[in-house]
Image (spheres, helix red, strand yellow):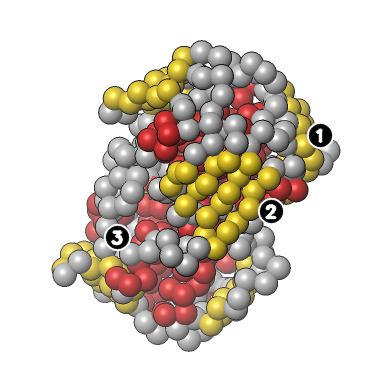
Amino acid sequence: MDKLIIEGGNRLVGTVKVSGAKNSALPLMAATLLTGGEFTLTNVPGLKDIETFSTLLSHFGAKVSENIDNTVTIDTTNVNQTDAPYELVKTMRASVLALGPLLARFKKARVSMPGGCAIGARPIDIHLKGLEALGAKVEVEHGYVIVSAEELTGADIALDFPTVTGTANLMLAAVFAKGTTTITGAAKEPEIEDLERALTDMGAKVEGAGTDTIKITGVEADALRAIEYRVMPDRIEAGTFMVAAAMTTGNVLIEDCPKDNLQALIEKLKSSGAKITTEAGGLRVTGDKPIKSVDITTAPYPGFPTDMQAQMMAMMTISSGLSVISETIFENRFMHVAELRRMGAKIRTDKKNAVINGVRELSGAEIMATDLRASASLVLAGLVANGKTTISRIYHLDRGYEKIEDKLNKLGADIKRVHNDNK
Ligand code: EPU
């Protein structure tokens, strides 16, 4: 298993380019299941999760190319399987996104029920309720969700919570449903808008993404065609670089930065003392000391993203005061706290809240990555810590950050990846 060894203390200076968004690429890959043909997705990040979804699509019978120069071609002409086994789903919850398009195209699907994961229980009840509203029969048997329908019919679906993959799944399921489907209380995340753009290019009739009401008017199956589509840039990767720049009192130009989708983070970084300016080439973040403490409460978009909570907490560990961070989306997303404490951070947690008392300096330590964004926060902590930080289990990081150490090293960080067969 690989480890990262970080020598802390370097300011980050230079230019970094943001990769395509994992959380957009995955639903877009799922959308290719809706119709037969050869799709070309560009700006696809080179990530483990993308490989896993490619394996899943291949399992269904699609011909999926390797990701070469961030381009993946997916030929879904011969898709003939509608069964996603446990072995494939257990490594990536986003596999559940196959339910909607398979049901829409083949009127049936059997997908292993994703289990809980490190950050929370993460049920899919809202997805399933929505599919039922469209007329599907939903059964859960032997750990599998089995959905089937003679015909899907448009319906008014009110979501109990604006679930992101739930919204995507229902948009995908409703593409051919007779009549109109209205999803209210929908997720407003930019990745949902990206999915709407792609579906519209394919010939589907979808409107309203980016608001809390999405309308899908069913089209005939032959109205859809395969397309070429560019995945939007990754706002969470961009946000992680922004925090890295601010924390290291660096000066970094972030290219391809979806700044309009990062307003909640930008506001918090500005309040903490960072300077953020828009330039022709991207967004420039300049850090300043002392880092002022800010309070954060995560919320669905456009609120402060839960996927940036751990990184901001890493930054608050070296702030000049007291900061309260409240996590409202996932019930167990503070696993980085114990590792940050091992580096000298002063953090107390109580259920949803973490109180961080800024310290002058973190000290390098041997720590362990636990989930994707927690891993990113540990890398950030390692960048500013005194001495050497060794992070194990970084396969979590490789699920969502493309070449992170190369990108940070180009900015002046000192990060080495070492391979260790024993651990
Ligand atoms: N929820 C339910 N029932 C459902 C669906 C969700 O109770 O049927 C709950 C979840 O348990 C959670 C909350 O609603 O407490 C939000 O979950 P949501 O469904 O919105 O999350 P998701 O779609 O599973 C996506 C991202 C996550 C990101 C969240 C929140 C993808 C593939 N994943 O997950 O990304 O944290 O939205 O923004 O898009 C990451 O990239 O590190 C990551 C975890």
Q: Residues within 10 Å of mark 1 (few under 14, many from 20)?
A: few
Query: Which residue is denoted by mark 2 in the rendering?
Result: 406
**Residue most extreme to the left:** 141
Q: What is the three-letter code of the residue carrying label 3?
A: Pro
Q: Amino acid at mark 2?
A: Asp
Q: Nearer the viewer, mark 1 or mark 2?
A: 2
Residue 285 rendering spot, x and y as whole percentages:
72, 31
Compared to residue 157, the image places residue 249 above or below, namely above
Q: CA distance from mark 3 to mark 2?
A: 32 Å
The Cα atoms of the two marked residues, 1 and 2, are separated by 24 Å
- Vertical placement of residue 325 versus 396, above or below: above
Question: Label for residue 114?
Answer: 3
Reply above or below: 374 against 317: below
Tell me: is circle 2 under 8 Å from ligand 1. no
Label 1 vs 2, first from the N-terminus = 1
The residue wearing badge 1 is 279
